[in-house]
Image (spheres, helix red, strand yellow):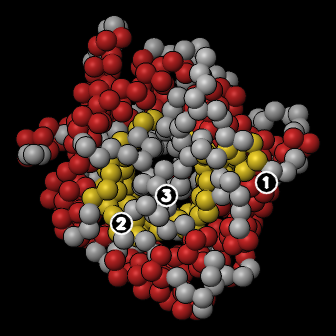
Amino acid sequence: MINIWEVNETNKMIEQENLDVRTITLGISLLDCIDSDLKVLNENIYNKITRVSADLVETGAEIERKYGIPIVNKRISVTPIALVGQAACKTPEDFVTIAKTLDQAAKAVGVNFIGGYSALVSKGMTKGDEDLIRSIPQALSETERVCSSINVGSTKTGIDMDAVKLMGEIVLKTAELTREEDSLGCAKLVIFCNAPDDNPFMAGAFHGVTEADAIINVGVSGPGVVKKALERVRGEDFETLCETIKRTAFKITRVGQLVAQEASRKMKIPFGIIDLSLAPTPAVGDSVAGILEEIGLEYAGAPGTTAALALLNDQVKKGGIMASSYVGGLSGAFIPVSEDQGMIDAVEAGALTLEKLEAMTCVCSVGLDMIAIPGDVPASTISGIIADEMAIGMINQKTTAVRLIPVIGKQVGEVVEFGGLLGHAPIMPVNKYGCEAFISRSGRIPAPVHSFKN
């Protein structure tokens, strides 16, 4: 039972340490909207989203007023549109009409993002899957709120390298079509390995086919709270360090549990999961890199960074699962460059490179996230970076993702401003050597062996 004492205990965290509920994400199944007539399909989608989510924003506002807990975002995720649209969509342009319908529905109910313009192609692509993927640049350049994700690999099926090759081209084309906004469209596109069905965080959220008709998922953040807690045990041993992180994660997760239960009760929609992810913001003191530095690193990226991040991620999970029976999603620590001032500082100091970030993704929650690179990087190189990250996820049986932003017209050393939660980012250098021949091979990288361990 959650009581008002626990809520009061979090007041200091909220007022002084940047604790917030990062998002309430309402997942909505669109499987019952499927129709072979494109016009009818779009009408069905718009009507269902607006009907089911009509009270989402106001419910979030009521909870904020009642408990004084900031709920930064109210969002929607839907069934992967490649599944929903295949009966009606015969061309990429047909899929774009659905993206515009999603955008209109999101605007009508007042949410800032809607996720699920997605396809699951870890073992192969249908024509409909490929049409949706090819529609992504146009869809993201002609909408404001739509987020897209493509799952191209999994531990069970391997990596679809045809999809990886295509996604490198799609990322670059999306960058070109949104070049007037510093290639912002790429900030709304995630490529996954082992994508979870219940992820409330954009841009990778979609409503999984294993989920109920509608579900409430909550994503909680709090890197500032963890950093403040660690300041109070500066210089103590590792046991004290770990216990402090676990206890803090427990308290943060309880806040999320309270919000999730309230939202579920008010909207009469089942509660799904709490995603306890230390998701940073550009605000001072709200940084995962800041936590790593408090643990003892001069900068994120210094020797010891991967070990410190592994410790942090594990203790966050351990604390979270004690606070809620339904912890899911990505839960752990995000390391997006543009959204974390400490990461930006580390890049500008020369301490943090793309290669070190890749090593860190072996132990963090997601992957190479919100990284700006030069706009003249070849599509095959982008595909190679995607393939490397997918391999980490596949072999390590974890979710990994790539959200690269090739900023057209900008080079290493320049800075791109995205604004809001997306922050700003220095353009990072990319290995100049190519992998065209590797990426051009067709087919799949097979799934790894599961029973033969050394």
Depth check, front residue: 18 or 194: 194
Q: Which mark is residue 205?
A: 3
Query: Going 48% across and 24% down the picture, which residue do you hit?
Result: 310
Q: How crowded is mark 2: few (under 14 residues within 10 Å), some or many (20 or more)?
A: some
Which amino acid lies under the numbered mark 2 shown in the image of this protein?
Ala
Element on which disc 1 rests: helix
Residue 375 falls left or right of residue 241? right
Element on which disc 2 rests: loop
Query: Going 60% across and 78% down the picture, which residue do you hit?
Result: 85
| Occupied quadrant, residue 18 | top left
Rendering coords of residue 13 (x, y %): 24, 38
Which amino acid lies under the numbered mark 3 shown in the image of this protein?
Ala
Rendering coords of residue 364 (x, y %): 51, 32
Q: How crowded is mark 1: few (under 14 residues within 10 Å), some or many (20 or more)?
A: many
Upstream in sequence: badge 1 or badge 3: 1
Residue 453 appears in the rendering: yes
Query: Going 28% across and 75% down the picture, which residue do you hit?
Result: 55
Asked if marks 1 and 3 touch (Cβ < 8 Å), the reply is: no
The Cα atoms of the two marked residues, 1 and 3, are separated by: 23 Å
Asked if marks 2 and 3 touch (Cβ < 8 Å), the reply is: no
